[in-house]
Image (cartoon, rainbow, N blue to C red):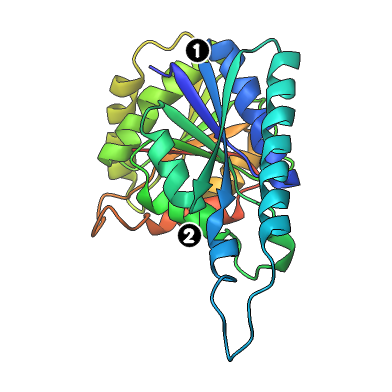
Amino acid sequence: MIQTILIASDGSEGAQAAERYGLALAKPLGARVRGLTVIETARVQSLRVASLGVAPPPLEALEGFLKARADAVCQKLGERARAAGLEIDVECVSGTADDRIVERAESSDLLVIGRDGENQAWRTALVGPTVDGVLRKTTRPAIVVPSGAELGGPLLLAFDGSPGSSIAARLAVEIAARLATSVHVFVDSKDKGRAASRFDEVRKLLGPLAVAGRETSSTLGRPDVKIVDAARSVRAGLIVMGAFARNRIHEYFLGSNAAAVVRTSPVAVLLAR
């Protein structure tokens, strides 16, 4: 059961999308909300060491700026939560962002984080290093929210029969029931018989849904592309899937389909563990 949601934010436009999404989800779930922002001390520490005989600059002003900015992020997130009628505990900590987020997420049932952080405009990858680090290290379910994503519409459950997708099915039932929305089940299989078996399996996991359930399968193309296309076609507000496929090698690495869906989806993605 989702009782506590942690929203990680750096105050950027992408992080604000995660703030809105997390708060919108917390209200119908009746979940307690925690907020977190991290002061990246590595930025300052890297300038403390003289290099090539050049002395480092005075850093007090930079440290003060980073602290003031983090405090402003906390304040705005708190104001946004209270405006939505929610109580929130907001914390500002120092350290490496992904490590601190992972640590704080351990005491929450669900983590919500923006896919597109403050350095989005300057990076070449589709997912920033903080989000990538968090998703690789955390043991908690996490929702990754792209810029512009909003909560609304049905849930798309991508089911492959893995332990993670079984957890995803249970989370989909809980969230859909609280949101009073439908669950659209997508199964990718090159064998129609296997697809039918997977649908039988997921029906047992979903049980007697209080909301409508729909099913579709596909046999051609890349699974990640088909999952995103299916979410678009049903106008889903959330894709729910396991973080690891059936043939995962090690839990440190995200499944290739999960990683690809997170990178390309215009819809928020919940990775279940």
Q: What is the quadrant of the C terminus in the image?
A: top left
Instruction: Tell me where residue 139 appears, x and y as whole percent.
Output: 33, 40
Q: Amino acid at mark 1?
A: Ala
Q: Secondary structure at mark 2?
A: loop
* Disc 2/disc 1 C-alpha distance (Å): 30 Å
Q: Is residue 187 visible?
A: no
Instruction: Tell me where residue 226 appears, x and y as whole percent.
Output: 53, 51
Q: Is residue 134 above or below residue 170?
A: below
Instruction: Tell me where residue 72 appears, x and y as whole percent.
Output: 73, 36
Q: Which mark is residue 177?
A: 1
Q: Looking at the image, tell me whether mark 2 or mark 1 is earlier in sequence order.
A: 1
Q: How many residues crowd around disc 1 within 10 Å: few (fewer than 14), some, or many (20 or more)?
A: some
Q: Secondary structure at mark 1?
A: helix
Question: Which residue is disc 2 drawn over?
Answer: 222
Q: Which mark is residue 94?
A: none
Which residue occupies 65% across, 41% down?
Answer: 232
Residue 178 horizontal side relative to residue 15, left or right: left
Seen from the viewer's position, the closer of residues 143 and 10 is 10
Seen from the viewer's position, the closer of residues 34 and 183 is 34
Q: What is the quadrant of the N terminus in the image?
A: top left
Q: How many residues crowd around disc 2 within 10 Å: few (fewer than 14), some, or many (20 or more)?
A: few
